[in-house]
Image: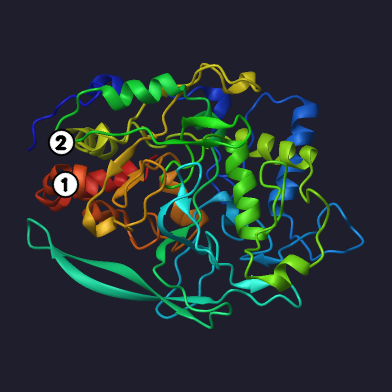
Amino acid sequence: MIALRAVGLSISLLVSVLASADVTHTVANREAYAQPFTGLDDGQLERFFRGRGLFRQAWVVAPSRDETVDGLGPLYNRVSCIACHPKNGRGQAPGQGEALRSMLLRLSVPGQDAQGGPKPHPVYGDQLNELGVPGVPGEGRAHVHWQEHAVRLGDGATVMLRKPSIELRELAYGPLDEVLTSARVGSPVFGLGLLEAIDASTLQAMAAEPKPDGVTGRVNTVWSVERQGTEAGRFGLKANQPDLRQQIAHAMLGDLGITSTLAPEQNCTPAQQACARAPHGGEPELDALQLGDLYFYLAHLAAPARRQRAEPVVIKGEQLFSAIGCTACHRPELVTGKHPLYPALSQQRIAPYTDLLLHDMGAGLADGREDFLASGRQWRTPALWGLGLSERINPGSGFLHDGRARSLQEAIVWHGGEAQIARQRYVGLGVQEREAIRVFLESL
C-alpha cells in the first residue's frame, strides 16, 4: 500500500469538501449538465433560458426572415453550439478514417501574432472550417486515423492506448504548408462561471506553491480584447482565454462564423475572396443582449454534486487518488473571489478538481503548438466534477483533449511529464486499487 501523503489538502479535509448547495444539484439523469443554480429569481431564470435557447439554436445563412439568428458562416464547422457540446458535455472523437463531428482542428504557423498568441495560417486562419455557405467553398476535410500501442501495467494487465493522426483532404485554398495542428473535442460547459470567479491571485499562489514529484504549474498570460491588456488565462484547453465572455465570442466566430462585439471581423482571410463577398447577418451578428444572455446561461450552469461519497470503495479510491499524487494538479477544493457581475458566483467553496494551471503533460500528449505562454507540451488541468455522469450523458465520448482515451484508465496512463511519477504509482497499483480509483472518479 502506498503511504498517504498530503498534497495541498489533508485527507480529512478532502473527505469533508462540499461545494455550496446553491451552485450544485443532485440531478443525475441525461439533463444533469443543464441545470441552473438554485435560487435564481424569475427574471434571472428568464435570462438563463434565453441563453439556453441561443446555445441550442441552429443558426441560418443570411439573409433570412429571422434576422436575430442569421449570419452563419461564411465559413463554419457546425450550425449550433450544442453540436460540439452535446447535452452540455463532451464532444466525441470520430472513428477510424471518419470525418470530424464534434472535433475541430486548430491551425497556426510558427511564431506569434501581435498579442503573443498563435500566428494564424495566412490562407486558412486559426481553425479548419470544413463547411461554407452557398457560393463559399469549405476549407477542406480532416479525417482521423488511429494508431494503437499496448502498455503493460505492474500486475501484467495490458492497456491499449490510441493516438490520432490527421489526414487533410479536399483543400480548397491551396496546400497547408508548415502548418501546426491540434485536434480538440468539445469540453463540458457547466460550472464555468465559478471557474471564472477564481481570483488571479489565487492562480498565482497555486503556481508558486512548492509541489511534490517535480510538479510545477504555470498561469498562462493572455490577451483581453475587452480590456486591451494581458491577463491570467482560465478557459480553453491551454487556458488561452481570460474570461467566459471572450471564450464564448471566439467560439461563436471560430465554430459558427458568428461575429460579436468582441470578435467583429468575419472569419475570412485575404485569400478567401468568395468568403469576403458573402452576405452577413448584421454588424455584429450576435448582438450585445444575445452575448450577455449566452454569458449568463453558461455562467449559471450548476455542477453535479458528488454521489456515493460514503461508500467504502469511494473513500478508498479518494485516498489513493491523493496518495499517488493526482491532487497536486486536480485540486479538490477552491474558493471563488468576488465576481464583478454575478453575486451568486462570489465566495463559493467549490470542488472542481482542477488548479486551472498549465502543466507539461509529456511528449505523448504534446501537440507541438504554442499558445501564449503555453508550450507545445502544456495543457490546462481539466476540471473533473461531473466526470462520473459522462458516460450516461455522452456515451462513448472519451477523455483528454482529443477524445483519444476511451476509458478513465487510458486517460491516466497517457499522463506524462509532470504527472509521470503519479502515473508510475498508478501503473504499480493492484487491480483492486485501480478499480477503487475508477469508482471514486465516477462518484464525482
When asked about the image quadrant of residue 42, the answer is: top right
Is 160 placed above or below 387 here?
Answer: below
Is 374 placed above or below 19 here?
Answer: below
The residue pinned by badge 2 equals: 214
Residue 16 appears in view: no
Q: In this view, does 162 lie to the left or right of 125?
A: left
Is 199 placed above or below 255 here?
Answer: above
Q: Where is residue 252 in the image (x, y as percent from the top left)?
A: 65, 52
- Is 300 or 61 nearer to us in this picture? 61
When asked about the image quadrant of residue 380, the answer is: top left
- Is 149 or 278 nearer to us in this picture? 278
Q: Residue sitting at 75 percent across and 48 percent down?
A: 53
Q: In this view, does 330 lie to the left or right of 304?
A: left
Q: Distance between the residues labelled 2 and 1?
A: 9 Å
Q: Where is residue 44 in the image (x, y as percent from the top left)?
A: 75, 29
The residue pinned by badge 1 equals: 420
Q: In this view, does 315 lie to the left or right of 281?
A: left
**Kind of residue sitting beneath label 2:** Gly
- The mark that comes first in sequence, 2 or 1, is 2
